[in-house]
Image: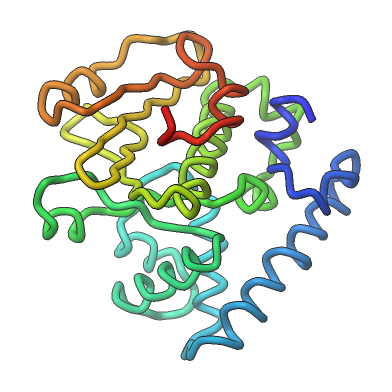
Amino acid sequence: MSLEQYIYYGGYPGAAPLINDYDRWSQYIESAIVDATINKDILQNNVVSKPALLRQTFELGATYSSQELSLTKLIGQLQDAGNTTTISSYLKLLSDAGMLTGLQKFANDAARKRASAPKFQVYNSALRNIYTDLALEQAVIQPKEWGRYFESVIGAHIVSQAFVDRYDVYYWREGNDEVDYILQKKNKIIAVEVKSNHESHTTGLAKFKEKFHPDNILLVGPEGMSAEDFLSTSPFGL
C-alpha cells in the first residue's frame, strides 16, 4: 500500500485485496471486524445491559477518533439513554477488545486525569474511515480533513503498540497549548506531536517540555520523523 492508502484503509490483511472497491471493503470491515468483535468477543463474554448503546458508543466514538469529546456531550448525541458511568464501562470493553479507547489528559494528579474529557482513538484507522463520507481521493486534497486522518493513523499505531510494549498513552492540553500523544512507562515520558503539513513550530511541545521535562520529544510529519518510519517501529523504542 501507499502511505495514503494505509492511512485511509488501515491495513487489515483480510480487507487489503478489497481496497479498490470501497463498498466491498467497508462491508468486510463492518462484518468481519466490527460485528464479529462486538457480537462474539464482547457480548458473549461480558454482561452488557444495553448492547445497542455499546454499538452506538463505538460508532460515534470512532468518528471522533483523534478528537476530544466529553462523555456528557457524547451522551447528548446518542439515541439510547445512558450515563457517563455506563459509557465509561463500554469504552473499557471496546478498548480491551482493541477497537476504541478514550485517552485521558496527562497530569500529575490522578483525579485530574479521570475528570478530563477523553480523546477518542481507534486502534486501526479502518474502524474510523468506514464511517466517513469522503473517498480517499477527496480526503487527501482537503488539508484540514486529511490532518485528522493522519493524526488518527499515528494514534492508532501508538495505542496498538501499547498492548505490546506496556506503556500508557495520554494527551495533554492547557489552554490553547496541546500535545497530541504522551507516552509514559514508569518514569519515562515521550511527547509526540503530529503534523500532516509542513508546519514545524508548536508552542504545545515547548510548554510541555518546560513543565514536565520529557525524556524525548517527537514531531511526526514532513518536518520531523516521516510517517513511514514512525509506523514501522515501536514508538517507545524511540
Residue 160: percent from the left, percent from the top?
52, 49
The percent coordinates of residue 47 (x first, y second) are 48, 91
Is 192 located above or below residue 114 in the figure?
above
With respect to residue 27, does 42 lie above or below? Answer: below
Q: Nearer the viewer, residue 94 or 169?
A: 169
Name the quadrant containing residue 3.
Answer: top right
Q: Residue at x 75, y 58 (%)?
A: 29
Indicate left or right for 198 with 207 as reference.
Answer: right
The structure residue drawn at horizontal position 57% and vertical position 37%, both measured from the top left corner, is 153
185 vs 230, left or right, is: left
Residue at 49 percent across and 86 percent down: it is 50
Q: How is the image coloured?
A: rainbow
Total labels: the figure holds 0
Q: Position of residue 180 (x, y in %)?
A: 36, 34
Q: Residue at 85%, 42% (x, y): give it.
A: 19
Q: Is residue 234 visible?
A: yes
Q: Position of residue 99 (x, y in %)?
A: 56, 60
Placement of the C terminus among the 4 image quadrants:
top left
- Left or right? Give the position of 33 relative to 67: right
Q: Quick check: can you spot residue 64?
A: no
Relative to 111, residue 129 above or below? above
Left or right: where 108 falls relative to 204: left
Can you say which quadrant of the picture contains the N terminus?
top right
Nearest to the observer: residue 187 or residue 59: 187
